[in-house]
Image: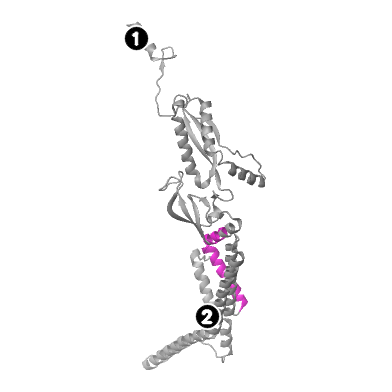
Amino acid sequence: MTGILRLKTSPASWPAVAMMCFLLLFFAPKEASVLAQDAPQEEVVDSVAVVEEEAIENLVANPSDTASRDSTLVSASKESANEAIGALQKLWDSFYFNLPKMLIAMGILALAWLLAKALRALLQKTIGRWQRSSAITTLALIAVWLLAIGIAVSVVAGDIRALVGSFGLIGLALSWSLQTPIESFTGWLLNSFQGYYRVGDRIRVGEVIGDVYRIDFLTTTVWEIGSPEQPGYVQAERPTGRMVTFPNNEIVTGTIINLTGDFPYVWDELSVAVANESDMELTLNVFERVALDLLGSYMAEPAHLYENLLRKAGLEDAVPDKPQVFISLQDSWTNITIRYLVGARERGKWKSEVTLRILQEMAKPTYLEKIIPVYPRQQVQYISPDGVPVDAMWFRNADDESA
């Protein structure tokens, strides 16, 4: 009966396996075996087994010879100690033999550090104003360090096959144990070259909304702002004072909403509920006039910019340069919706101003009986025995006649 032995290892154990292989490669290189071959060749025997076999034969031949047995055990102990000392000596000889290689490898890493520092200064001076300069500089420094580490490892190993094997084990370990950091680094690369968001942009990622403060290799940090749709300490679109950090793999696996990217304006709406008995035509005219007085001149430039962006993208569409007013029916009231284009960071301010102007206009005596706001109210309807709606006086007259 045969069986298969399966070794189940967690992803976190792969770096330990790779490190152990590297240590074995470092302390037992090819040159150490060459030195061992140059030494005088002697027959290798298992001294402990031989001594034990001789001791057993002596005991069988002379069971009463206690002194001979003790001397045999002492001899076996000495042989074991000599073997241990010999192993330590070989380990020390291997380390001493690799000491020059270690020094050369450290020198290579020191030169790589100096080269990386000089290359960073050069790139910042030449392409520092370019939007993607940070990504180019980082990739160049990573390439320098990878090349330097590869050369240093090859110097210590002395065999390109061992170097390739080491990189294979390390790559396997990284692919298993660092999946999220690798995805985050990939997201950082995509954002660096595609420009999904930059420092200073107002973005929304999952449940996080805020202004981008810092972008690192693996994470992005934003200053959080409040939102009516999100739970928090602040409901208005104002800074909460909290800094939120999320991994860059959200760029690969999630959805990024940039509110201030190429177009720093957004459409916003304000809905006002009025009673169905209101003069709807008058209500529409009043609301449109109030919004036009407040936002008419403000919307002209954003609307023109929006049209140009749509035209460049092949999505030609007419963008209104003035606020628009729409009407919609609800269960027991009517909604008047004002739609306008404002800056993404000014939505709260403009909505508050439009609301105030509408309330002030509705409170004027001219519109008190014509634009009726919706309040909680109860309506009683009287039905006659014939099933016809009647007023309360009908029941009074009916009571008088019956009396």
Residue 199 is situated, as x and y percent measured from the top left of the image, at: 53, 56
What residue is shown at x 61% (from left), y 56% (from top)? 194
Residue 141 figure quarter:
bottom right
Above or below — where is 119 with respect to 296? Answer: below
Q: Is residue 180 visible?
A: yes
* Residue at the disc numbered 1: 399
Specify few, some or many for label 2: CA neighbours under 10 Å numbering under 14, 14-19, or 20 or more: some
Q: Nearer the viewer, residue 384 or 323?
A: 323
Dot 1 amino acid type: Asp
Above or below — where is 372 with respect to 120? Answer: above
Dot 2 amino acid type: Phe
Secondary structure, mark 2, is helix
* Residue at the disc numbered 2: 27
Specify few, some or many for label 1: CA neighbours under 10 Å numbering under 14, 14-19, or 20 or more: few
Q: Which mark sits nearer the N-terminus, 1 or 2?
A: 2
Quick check: is 116 in the magenta stretch?
no
Residue 76 is situated, as x and y percent measured from the top left of the image, at: 43, 89
Per the rendered image, the range of residues in magenta is 159-187
Residue 297 figure quarter:
top right
